[in-house]
Image (tube, rainbow, N blue to C red):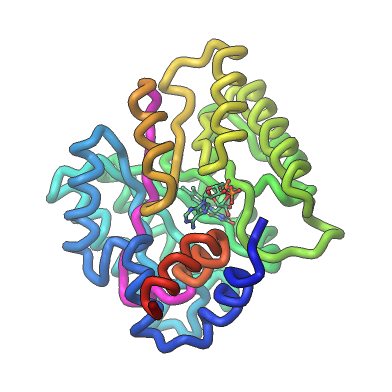
Amino acid sequence: MMNPFNYILVKTIPLLPKKLVRVFANKYIAGDSISDAVKTVRELNGGKIMATIDVLGESIKDRNEAAKSRDESLEVLDTIVKEKLDGNLSVKLTMLGLAMDYDLCRGLFSEILDSAKEKNIFVRIDMEDSSVTDITIKMYEEMRKRYDNVGLVLQAYLRRTENDILKLTTEKSNFRLCKGIYIEPESIAYKGRQEIRDNYLRLLRIMFEKNAYAGIATHDDYLTDGAKEIIRDFKLTNDKFEFQMLLGVREKLRSEIVNEGYRMRVYVPFGMRWYEYSIRRFQENPNVAGQVVKSIFS
Ligand code: FDA
């Protein structure tokens, strides 16, 4: 339960100067540059943890910015090979112009997937808010016909997700299942903490029944424990799933899962456009935000 002090802090964080927000955003992002991401991924790889690298940013305003985002993703792919990193790429399609011009996005994303395919690197499409769910899935389906190194994120809070899994799963489907982070209306999304958890585990079972590969993306013990139970029920081997967590979140739980012999991948965001991402992380974890702000002001 969020205490009232933390609640007020979380609401005021967006009003603070960016420089100050950055001080406590550092926990959640690798840094501004690709060399910062390389350093973070190396450290993770040293601890037997894989990575997925994300160039920070969301919906872009013009075609030049979309092309720049493509270039940044291509640079990540080149760097993964050059630096021999155990990692793949996560992409937000709105950064490639999805919400502005579907065809433009298709062209830019194809270039990324061509390069990734040649390098044998997997690319994950992050799922954004519900205004783009349909077109994100459309793009995924289109690309999946041409590439098998592409996978999608599905959100357990959306009521539609069960149908999406049933519709989308084919041989070698690879999904990341997360709760979902955007604020969505009750008409399309479950709202209760427990009902989202229940749906998450139900969907995970369906994914495994349909023989999909699952990235189990959560920091919630209830779900990691529930997932392990399902993994035992289905007698799944490690090549059928992996756990996934965000950089800087619940590192103790992360180590426990790794020490139990499960595969773990950490989401490593980097780049100049760190602000919105960090604000979302604080809003998820007001207690951390509370501690940091207290330490800054005391
Ligand atoms: P929950 O929010 O209940 O957290 C469980 C516990 O973890 C909390 O009680 C707290 O202790 C701790 N915790 C959670 N967040 C924390 C934080 N920021 N700092 C410190 N502690 C924290 N969403 C989406 O809509 N589209 C996407 O593409 C993705 N991609 C994605 C990738 C990966 C690898 C992960 C792990 C998550 C995502 N998400 C996402 C975000 C996801 O939807 C969800 O919002 C967060 O993972 C939080 O949900 P949990 O399942 O962790 O539970």
Q: Residue at x 46, y 68 (%)?
A: 277
**Which of the two residues, 21 or 293, is positioned nearer the viewer here?**
293
Rendering quarter of residue 270: bottom left
State left or right for residue 137 relative to residue 242: right
Whether residue 149 is visible here, answered yes or no, is: yes
Looking at the picture, how far across and down is residue 7, in whole percent?
A: 63, 71
Above-or-below relation of 199 to 98: above
Asked if the magenta segment contains residue 267, the reply would be yes
Rendering quarter of residue 67: bottom left
State left or right for residue 31 relative to residue 3: left
Q: How many numbered discs?
A: 0
Asked if the magenta segment contains residue 199, the reply would be no
Above-or-below relation of 155 to 13: above
**Which of the two residues, 85 or 109, is positioned nearer the viewer here?**
85
Looking at the picture, how far across and down is residue 87, in whole percent?
A: 29, 44
Name the outermost residue toward the right.
187
**Which of the two residues, 271 or 249, is positioned nearer the viewer here?**
249
Q: Residue at x 37, y 52 (%)?
A: 247
State left or right for residue 135 relative to residue 217: right
Whether residue 106 is visible here, answered yes or no, is: no
Looking at the picture, how far across and down is residue 205, in whole percent?
A: 67, 26
Name the outermost residue toward the left.
82
Looking at the picture, how far across and down is residue 95, in whole percent?
A: 46, 71
The span picked out in magenta is 262-276
In which quadrant of the rendered image does the N terminus lie? bottom right
**Which of the two residues, 236 or 227, is positioned nearer the viewer here?**
227
Q: Residue at x 29, y 40 (%)?
A: 120
Q: Residue at x 40, y 48 (%)?
A: 123
